Image: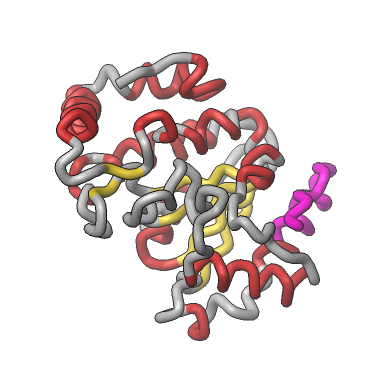
Amino acid sequence: MELTKETLGGWLPAVEEIAQEPWCRELFSRVEEAYEKNDPPVYPPKEDLFTALRLTPPEQVKCVIVGQDPYHQPGQAHGLAFSVQPGTRIPPSLRNIGKELESDLGLSLPDHGTLTPWAEEGVLLLNNVLTVYDSKPNSHKKWGWGQFTTKLLQTLEEQPQPIVFVLWGREAQSKGGLVNPERSRYPRLVLQSNHPSPLSASRGFFGSRPFSQVNQFLEQHGVAPIPWG
Protein backbone atom coordinates (compact mmCIF):
# COMPACT_ATOMS: atom_id res chain seq x y z
CA MET A 1 0.00 0.00 0.00
CA GLU A 2 1.50 3.30 -1.09
CA LEU A 3 1.58 5.69 1.87
CA THR A 4 3.09 8.93 0.61
CA LYS A 5 2.51 12.67 0.80
CA GLU A 6 1.10 12.48 -2.72
CA THR A 7 -1.54 9.89 -1.81
CA LEU A 8 -2.40 11.02 1.72
CA GLY A 9 -1.51 14.69 2.01
CA GLY A 10 -1.67 15.95 5.57
CA TRP A 11 -3.03 12.62 6.82
CA LEU A 12 0.28 10.85 6.18
CA PRO A 13 1.61 10.95 9.79
CA ALA A 14 -1.68 9.64 11.22
CA VAL A 15 -1.99 6.83 8.67
CA GLU A 16 1.66 5.82 9.05
CA GLU A 17 1.09 5.45 12.79
CA ILE A 18 -2.09 3.41 12.30
CA ALA A 19 -0.35 1.25 9.69
CA GLN A 20 2.13 0.02 12.29
CA GLU A 21 -0.60 -1.92 14.09
CA PRO A 22 -0.81 -5.64 13.15
CA TRP A 23 -4.50 -5.56 12.22
CA CYS A 24 -3.86 -2.64 9.83
CA ARG A 25 -0.90 -4.35 8.20
CA GLU A 26 -3.17 -7.34 7.60
CA LEU A 27 -5.90 -5.07 6.17
CA PHE A 28 -3.53 -3.30 3.79
CA SER A 29 -2.03 -6.62 2.67
CA ARG A 30 -5.48 -8.02 1.90
CA VAL A 31 -6.51 -4.89 0.00
CA GLU A 32 -3.26 -4.90 -1.98
CA GLU A 33 -3.83 -8.54 -2.94
CA ALA A 34 -7.41 -7.83 -4.03
CA TYR A 35 -6.28 -4.98 -6.28
CA GLU A 36 -3.54 -7.14 -7.81
CA LYS A 37 -5.89 -10.06 -8.57
CA ASN A 38 -8.66 -7.77 -9.85
CA ASP A 39 -11.03 -10.76 -9.87
CA PRO A 40 -13.56 -9.47 -9.17
CA PRO A 41 -12.58 -5.82 -9.75
CA VAL A 42 -12.16 -3.59 -6.69
CA TYR A 43 -13.51 -0.04 -6.41
CA PRO A 44 -12.50 2.71 -6.24
CA PRO A 45 -9.46 2.49 -8.53
CA LYS A 46 -6.34 2.01 -6.45
CA GLU A 47 -5.04 5.50 -7.22
CA ASP A 48 -8.27 6.97 -5.78
CA LEU A 49 -8.33 4.92 -2.58
CA PHE A 50 -7.37 7.82 -0.30
CA THR A 51 -8.87 10.69 -2.28
CA ALA A 52 -10.96 11.90 0.67
CA LEU A 53 -7.87 12.18 2.86
CA ARG A 54 -5.68 13.76 0.20
CA LEU A 55 -8.21 16.49 -0.62
CA THR A 56 -9.18 17.35 2.96
CA PRO A 57 -6.24 17.40 5.40
CA PRO A 58 -7.04 17.20 9.14
CA GLU A 59 -6.34 20.84 9.88
CA GLN A 60 -8.79 21.94 7.17
CA VAL A 61 -11.73 19.71 8.12
CA LYS A 62 -14.88 21.68 8.91
CA CYS A 63 -17.42 18.93 8.37
CA VAL A 64 -17.31 15.13 8.13
CA ILE A 65 -19.94 13.27 6.14
CA VAL A 66 -19.68 9.52 6.72
CA GLY A 67 -20.85 7.07 4.07
CA GLN A 68 -21.17 3.28 4.08
CA ASP A 69 -18.83 1.95 1.39
CA PRO A 70 -17.95 2.88 -2.21
CA TYR A 71 -20.35 2.59 -5.12
CA HIS A 72 -19.94 -0.89 -6.55
CA GLN A 73 -20.52 -0.38 -10.29
CA PRO A 74 -17.83 0.47 -12.88
CA GLY A 75 -16.88 4.12 -13.29
CA GLN A 76 -18.68 5.39 -10.20
CA ALA A 77 -16.48 5.44 -7.09
CA HIS A 78 -13.45 7.71 -6.87
CA GLY A 79 -12.70 7.79 -3.16
CA LEU A 80 -15.24 10.36 -1.92
CA ALA A 81 -18.36 9.22 -0.07
CA PHE A 82 -21.56 9.76 -2.09
CA SER A 83 -19.63 11.35 -4.97
CA VAL A 84 -19.30 9.88 -8.47
CA GLN A 85 -16.83 10.39 -11.27
CA PRO A 86 -17.77 12.89 -14.00
CA GLY A 87 -19.89 11.41 -16.76
CA THR A 88 -21.54 8.90 -14.44
CA ARG A 89 -25.27 8.73 -13.89
CA ILE A 90 -26.12 10.28 -10.51
CA PRO A 91 -27.11 7.51 -8.04
CA PRO A 92 -30.42 7.75 -6.14
CA SER A 93 -28.83 8.59 -2.76
CA LEU A 94 -26.88 11.47 -4.24
CA ARG A 95 -29.95 12.65 -6.08
CA ASN A 96 -31.80 12.77 -2.75
CA ILE A 97 -28.93 14.69 -1.18
CA GLY A 98 -29.40 17.21 -3.97
CA LYS A 99 -33.12 17.45 -3.24
CA GLU A 100 -32.45 18.17 0.42
CA LEU A 101 -29.78 20.73 -0.46
CA GLU A 102 -32.26 22.56 -2.68
CA SER A 103 -34.98 22.40 -0.04
CA ASP A 104 -32.61 23.53 2.70
CA LEU A 105 -30.56 26.26 1.02
CA GLY A 106 -32.03 26.67 -2.44
CA LEU A 107 -28.81 25.37 -3.99
CA SER A 108 -28.14 22.62 -6.52
CA LEU A 109 -25.56 19.88 -6.81
CA PRO A 110 -23.30 19.98 -9.85
CA ASP A 111 -24.85 18.14 -12.80
CA HIS A 112 -21.93 15.73 -12.92
CA GLY A 113 -22.41 14.55 -9.33
CA THR A 114 -18.75 15.00 -8.41
CA LEU A 115 -18.36 16.43 -4.90
CA THR A 116 -14.68 17.35 -5.15
CA PRO A 117 -15.51 21.05 -4.53
CA TRP A 118 -17.00 20.09 -1.16
CA ALA A 119 -13.85 18.19 -0.23
CA GLU A 120 -11.70 21.16 -1.20
CA GLU A 121 -13.80 23.41 1.04
CA GLY A 122 -13.26 21.30 4.16
CA VAL A 123 -15.88 18.54 3.88
CA LEU A 124 -14.27 15.16 4.63
CA LEU A 125 -16.34 12.71 2.55
CA LEU A 126 -15.27 9.52 4.30
CA ASN A 127 -16.79 6.10 3.76
CA ASN A 128 -16.78 3.77 6.75
CA VAL A 129 -15.34 1.08 4.44
CA LEU A 130 -12.95 2.27 1.72
CA THR A 131 -13.08 -0.58 -0.82
CA VAL A 132 -15.66 -2.92 -2.34
CA TYR A 133 -15.88 -5.71 -4.91
CA ASP A 134 -17.70 -5.11 -8.17
CA SER A 135 -21.48 -5.57 -7.77
CA LYS A 136 -21.09 -6.73 -4.15
CA PRO A 137 -22.06 -3.93 -1.73
CA ASN A 138 -20.50 -4.15 1.72
CA SER A 139 -18.30 -7.04 0.57
CA HIS A 140 -15.27 -5.62 2.43
CA LYS A 141 -17.13 -4.66 5.58
CA LYS A 142 -15.36 -7.24 7.75
CA TRP A 143 -11.85 -6.59 6.47
CA GLY A 144 -10.94 -4.02 9.12
CA TRP A 145 -11.74 -0.76 7.36
CA GLY A 146 -14.20 0.20 10.09
CA GLN A 147 -11.41 0.13 12.65
CA PHE A 148 -9.20 2.15 10.32
CA THR A 149 -11.77 4.90 9.78
CA THR A 150 -12.54 4.97 13.50
CA LYS A 151 -8.86 5.75 14.11
CA LEU A 152 -9.02 8.54 11.54
CA LEU A 153 -12.02 10.13 13.22
CA GLN A 154 -10.33 9.85 16.60
CA THR A 155 -7.40 11.77 15.12
CA LEU A 156 -9.76 14.64 14.34
CA GLU A 157 -10.47 15.05 18.04
CA GLU A 158 -7.00 16.56 18.34
CA GLN A 159 -7.86 19.30 15.84
CA PRO A 160 -8.80 22.59 17.52
CA GLN A 161 -11.11 23.95 14.80
CA PRO A 162 -14.92 23.57 15.00
CA ILE A 163 -16.05 20.36 13.27
CA VAL A 164 -19.52 19.04 12.42
CA PHE A 165 -20.05 15.29 12.09
CA VAL A 166 -22.93 14.38 9.74
CA LEU A 167 -24.06 10.79 10.20
CA TRP A 168 -26.66 9.49 7.76
CA GLY A 169 -27.95 5.98 8.40
CA ARG A 170 -27.01 3.12 10.69
CA GLU A 171 -23.49 2.51 9.38
CA ALA A 172 -22.50 6.14 9.81
CA GLN A 173 -24.21 6.43 13.18
CA SER A 174 -22.08 3.56 14.46
CA LYS A 175 -19.35 6.23 14.61
CA GLY A 176 -21.46 8.54 16.74
CA GLY A 177 -19.95 7.38 20.01
CA LEU A 178 -16.56 8.71 18.95
CA VAL A 179 -17.70 12.32 19.34
CA ASN A 180 -19.16 13.81 22.50
CA PRO A 181 -19.67 17.55 22.00
CA GLU A 182 -20.16 18.09 25.73
CA ARG A 183 -16.83 16.49 26.61
CA SER A 184 -14.71 17.60 23.69
CA ARG A 185 -12.10 20.26 24.29
CA TYR A 186 -13.08 21.89 21.00
CA PRO A 187 -16.38 22.94 19.36
CA ARG A 188 -18.17 19.89 17.95
CA LEU A 189 -21.64 19.19 16.59
CA VAL A 190 -23.15 15.82 15.65
CA LEU A 191 -26.08 15.68 13.20
CA GLN A 192 -27.84 12.35 12.67
CA SER A 193 -30.69 11.32 10.40
CA ASN A 194 -31.82 8.47 8.20
CA HIS A 195 -29.78 7.58 5.13
CA PRO A 196 -30.58 9.47 1.89
CA SER A 197 -31.26 6.22 0.02
CA PRO A 198 -34.73 5.83 -1.56
CA LEU A 199 -35.59 3.23 1.10
CA SER A 200 -35.19 5.62 4.02
CA ALA A 201 -34.93 9.23 2.82
CA SER A 202 -38.61 9.93 3.46
CA ARG A 203 -38.32 8.61 7.03
CA GLY A 204 -36.15 11.39 8.41
CA PHE A 205 -33.56 12.51 5.89
CA PHE A 206 -35.82 14.84 3.94
CA GLY A 207 -36.44 17.91 6.06
CA SER A 208 -33.41 17.36 8.31
CA ARG A 209 -31.70 20.49 6.91
CA PRO A 210 -28.10 19.40 7.57
CA PHE A 211 -26.45 21.95 5.29
CA SER A 212 -27.88 25.03 6.95
CA GLN A 213 -27.19 23.56 10.40
CA VAL A 214 -23.55 22.94 9.51
CA ASN A 215 -23.08 26.50 8.31
CA GLN A 216 -24.92 28.00 11.26
CA PHE A 217 -22.63 26.14 13.67
CA LEU A 218 -19.49 27.18 11.81
CA GLU A 219 -20.54 30.82 11.67
CA GLN A 220 -21.37 30.80 15.37
CA HIS A 221 -17.75 29.86 15.99
CA GLY A 222 -16.24 32.39 13.62
CA VAL A 223 -15.58 30.02 10.74
CA ALA A 224 -16.52 30.72 7.12
CA PRO A 225 -19.53 28.67 5.99
CA ILE A 226 -19.22 25.94 3.38
CA PRO A 227 -20.30 26.93 -0.15
CA TRP A 228 -22.47 23.88 -0.76
CA GLY A 229 -23.75 24.89 -4.19
Magenta run includes residue 226: yes
| As drawn, 51 above or below 92 | above
Residue placed most toward the observer, 200 or 190: 200
Locate residue 33: give its quadrant. Answer: top left
Q: Is residue 32 visible?
A: yes
Residue at the spot 70% in from the left edge and 57% down from the top edge: 214
Q: In x, y percent, where is residue 143? A: 19, 42
Q: How many marks?
A: 0
Residue at the spot 24% in from the left edge and 22% down from the top edge: 21
Image quadrant in which the C terminus is located: bottom right
| As drawn, 79 above or below 54 | below
Give the extent of the magenta segment: 213-229
Magenta run includes residue 71: no
Residue at the spot 37% in from the left edge and 66% down from the top edge: 170
Name, please, the residue furthest toward the front.
87
Residue at the spot 62% in from the left edge and 74% down from the top edge: 208
Locate residue 206: give its quadrant. Answer: bottom right
